[in-house]
Amino acid sequence: MKLSHRITHLTEGGTDGWDVFYRARQMIAEGHAVTELTIGEHDIPTSPDILEQMYASATGGHTGYAMIPGTDLLRDTVAARVQWRTGVKTTRHNVLITPGGQAALFAAHVALCAPGDVGLFLEPYYATYPGTIRAAGAVAKAVETRAEDAFQPRADLIEAQADGAVSLLINTPNNPTGVVYSAETLSAIADLCHRRDLWLISDEVYDSQVWEGIHLSPRALPGMAERTLVVGSMSKSHAMTGSRCGWIIGPEEVIDHLITLATHTNYGVPGFIQDAASYALSAGQALEDEVAAPFRRRREMAMQLLARQNTIGLIPAQGAMYLMLDIRATGLSGVEFANALLDAHSIAVMPGESFGASAAGHIRVAMTVDDERLATSLQILSDFAAQLSRDRGAA
Ligand code: PMP
């Protein structure tokens, strides 16, 4: 039987860049000890306090169908967080609760892009972006950001691809680069959106993980609240990846349509999960800082450790739980380096190429193991790179 082109071409038939990751998983399944610095998942579970609230809500009866747009309590709590952080007036009518940020990214593109419309996204990109845009029926078009610009997006490069585009997806703090977009970058992007009449989809799931500078939401820029959908999530800020709870913030009219979409797709998010999320969010920034603290500490440690060598370049790690390392001095591609490191030292990292060609010659390290193990692994990694670079010089 024939399947739809949309589903068979979701990843455009190529490898999805996760070969090293699958190989590491296979090695672990065969009993090898592998240090996994691949995916963005905390090394701590969801806090017992939050789980207690979840349990109390479920045993208290909140196990039936929940309100499809989200409970009033969670929508109000999310709206208050957004308004407090950005100064933009936000009510529950600007909020749709979704099963994680991923579902929000999909719904946003369904809402904004008609079949065949171009949805722009920036490279290097979070692994699911192009497939999500295609799943929504749109044409996914990548715009590069460049290592020489420290991966800050450039409005002129975006503009060069803007013909036929209706939306632009951005992500700050950024996965995979760890870059936080500057005020200048965001105002140039906002200006471009006005000029080219683009919707902006702003993925801000790492907004609680900023190590340098400040997180600015483009929705707060003049005239942007009417053309911006913000994607948020409990996953990274509260170590609740498995709970599948996120949101979209946008103009009321868009949210109304998205509620209709939710009614015909996922039918909302479990009430006991939403109650746990409301509880977690009402603990305020102190809890978010606590969850972010290990990454802040490890990033500081990594910067000190990498400052002692000169083979690997560190892209300024301004936010999120990743380090983007430039390994071009070794003469290897990101894929070759990641495979060689896994074979020689059982350390798994993501090749830059898995996030698009503009991250070629780089690797992404997730800071998701304890401090000591991360320090040891980075030392091994940098010694390995230095040796490769020396061998190359000698050859
Ligand atoms: N956006 C980015 C940039 C991400 O890194 C992730 C998860 N790794 C998501 C969205 C989706 O997160 P979730 O669905 O868990 O909220």
Image (tube, rainbow, N blue to C red):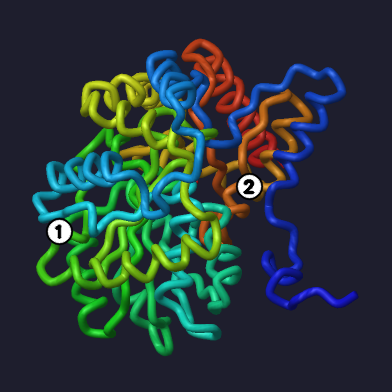
Name the quarter where the C terminus is drawn. top right
| Rendered position, 41 above or below 64 | above
Along the viewing direction, whichever of 165 and 254 lies nearer the viewer: 254
At horizontal 59% and vertical 30% (from top left) the residue drawn is 37
Judge from the rendering whether residue 292 lies leftward or rightward of residue 370; answer left or right: left
Q: Which of 123 and 244 is in front in this view?
A: 244
Residue labelled with disc 1: 220
Number of dots carrying numbers: 2
Q: Is residue 13 visible?
A: yes
Mark drawn on residue 171: none
Q: Where is residue 324 in the image (x, y as percent from the top left)?
A: 47, 41
Whether residue 4 is situated above or below residue 182 in the rendered picture: below
Secondary element at tag 2: helix
The residue carrying pointer 1 sits among few (fewer than 14), some (14 to 19) or many (20 or more) residues within 10 Å by Cα, namely some
Residue 177 seen in render: no
Give me the C-alpha separation between circle 1 and circle 2: 37 Å
Q: Mark 2 points at which residue?
A: 334
Q: Is residue 394 placed above or below 144 in the rendered structure? A: above
